[in-house]
Image (spheres, helix red, strand yellow):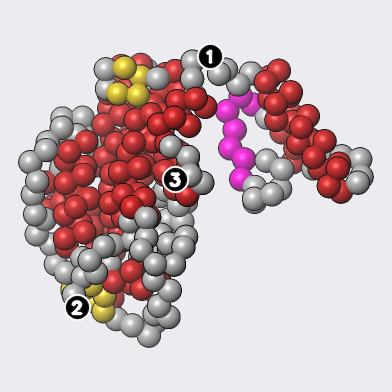
Amino acid sequence: MQAPKELLAKTPKRAGQPRYEETLLGHSEAVVDCFGKLFGTRSSATRLGHEWLRFFKLPLDEFGRFQINGLAACALHDIGKTNSGFDDAVNRRATGQLVRHDHLGGILLYSPAIRASVAHTDLDWDIVIAAITGHHLKADSGSFGNPMNADRNVFQVYVDGVSRLVNLARCVLGNSAPCDVKIESCWTIDEMLGAQVLAFKRAFRGLKDRIAKDGLARRLLWAVRAALIVADAAGSGLPREGHTISEWLVAAFSDGQEIDTPYIDTKIIVPRIAAIEKETRKPFGWNDFQVAAEVLSGRALLLASCGSGK
């Protein structure tokens, strides 16, 4: 099977030639760029970078490890999209994906060939792979790697696309010399993928044990995965809305833009309540979970659907 000329990260917003930021490489570069603008460089963390470490209870001398592992995760987060099933899905072909791209991404990154190609003193492959595998919050031991189409058994991994993303990771970690990754291109669901899934699950039982015992590694994983989710959202949404990533993020997260209680009240909550009352023509009332949020601790996780008022 011949690889397409350009791999896509998402279905093009308009028909015809996709924009560069919709290609797999273009989107990955945008996510790397967002991570840097949000959190800073190895030698100079942004205010958000400092606050991020404080929130996850990481010492400031861990910023270098956070930054290196975060950059690697951003560069490689969509490596699982380099396959024929995902290409079918984004090009609206009826066949569609055979395996979730975040699951396949973890399996690909577990291969010795890729890990040998991307190296850095502070790179922790356990953390990078776990962050990528879980960045859509859809990874659990029961469903991990399960086929999504029972009628098909074979799919193609586009090795050239894998190499492009590996070289992006090498570049952002300071190695500009390109390399070609040697991995298998033809995969079968019932044999090759099945064996890889079992090996992956065995390996990551070790990570589960490790983070259960090592609080620093656990918090670093949380920080990297959350940062990847944020950078991915910014790298996906901003270009599609016509925003220049650098300008928008720098303005939104400038040192003088402190989002404190008065800012949230006057700039977000009060205008939103007014808009809801105007739209519904009824007095505004808080949802039960919004009322309950008042008594949460300083660190809490809220899971709520879009449009629910979170």
Picture coordinates of residue 95 (x, y %)?
39, 80
Prevailing secondary structure class for the magenta stretch in the rendered image: loop
Q: Secondary structure at mark 1?
A: loop
Above or below, 250 relative to 187: above
Q: Is residue 166 left or right of residue 33?
A: left
Query: In the rendered structure, which disc, 1 or 3, sits on the residue that comes first in sequence?
Result: 3
How far is mark 3 from mark 2, CA to CA? 32 Å
Residue 223: x, y in percent? 41, 33
Residue 157 image-quadrant placement? bottom left
Tag shown at residue 256: 1
Mark 2: few, some, or many residues within 10 Å (few <14, many ≥20)? few
Q: Is residue 95 left or right of residue 127?
A: right
Per the model, the C-alpha gap separating discs 1 and 3 is 25 Å
Residue where numbered disc 3 is placed: 239
* Image quarter of the N terminus: bottom left
Q: Amino acid at mark 1?
A: Gly
Look at the image and give the residue range highlighted in magenta. Answer: 297-303
Is residue 65 something one can see in this rendering?
yes
- Looking at marks 1 and 2 on the same chain, the residue that comes earlier in the sequence is marked by 2
Residue tagged 2: 1
Amino acid at dot 3? Pro
Instruction: Name the residue type under label 2.
Output: Met
**Label 2's element?**
loop
Q: Position of residue 164 (x, y in %)?
A: 19, 52
Query: What residue lies at 62% left-to-right and 40% top-to-bottom?
Result: 302
Q: Earlier in the sequence, mark 3 or mark 2?
A: 2
Residue ID at (27%, 22%): 42
